[in-house]
Amino acid sequence: MILTHDWASWCFVNSHKDFIPSHGKIKIGNNVWLGENVTILKNVTIGNNVIIGIGSVVTKDIPDNCIAVGIPAKIIGTYDDYYKKRKLQYINECFEYANSILDTGRELKEDDFYDDYPIFVNGSNFRNYNYPYHNIFNDEQFEVWKKNHKSQFNGFEEFVNAVKERRHE
């Protein structure tokens, strides 16, 4: 929710028979992600490369390259530190997800990992997997990704074998 007005002024109508509007601008930079139920109040600027956590209330400026959460939103880290943390957590999350499927007695299928393709897809094997990469990347970004991304596993079967091996350890 982006609130450029403060409608508390209606209280003055009731108590003083006077209306005193209150409003201010909000600026949101590039590459900003706002979690669900975030509220941004007037007179706030959010910089570039910023992530605002779910349910936060932004009452003050958030500079570039920050992660902010809470009520009121406070900076808890840098964008780059969070990127590095997510890269590490992602691998464990894929294994946990795979194990939850195996725990039901069902075998793993490629489609189960539709959004987890980066763990086993890279620039040399992406054609082997039916994924609409254009939904994630534009053409330029996809070329860079194909050139630079190093998947943890060389294909889905290698990933499945690693999951099963780790289960038996």
Image (cartoon, rainbow, N blue to C red):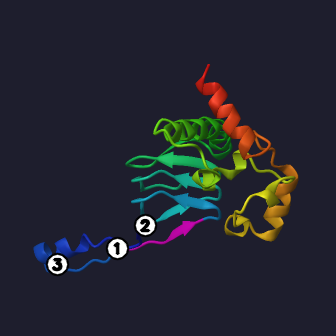
In the drawing, does residue 134 fall left or right of residue 109?
right
111 is within the stretch colored magenta: no
Mark 1, secondary structure of its residue: loop
Whether label 3 touches label 2, CB < 8 Å: no
Above or below, comparing residue 114 to residue 74 in the picture: below
Q: Identify the mark nearer the N-term, 2 or 1.
A: 1
Quarter placement of the C terminus: top right
* Residue 83 location, quadrant: top right
- Residue at the location (72% across, 64% down)? 133
Report the magenta residues as a range: 22-28
**Residue type marked 2:** Lys
Q: Which mark is residue 13?
A: 3
Instruction: Measure how far apart labels 3 and 2 are at the Cα level.
Output: 21 Å
Please state the horizontal and vertical placement of residue 60, each as a whole percent of the image: 47, 55
Q: Give the residue at mark 1.
A: 22
**Residue type marked 1:** Ser
Q: Give the residue at mark 2.
A: 42
Whether label 2 touches label 1, CB < 8 Å: yes
23 is within the stretch colored magenta: yes
Please state the horizontal and vertical placement of residue 143, each as a whole percent of the image: 85, 62
- Nearest-to-viewer mark from 3 and 2: 2
- Residue at the location (81% across, 49% down)? 149
Mark 3, secondary structure of its residue: helix
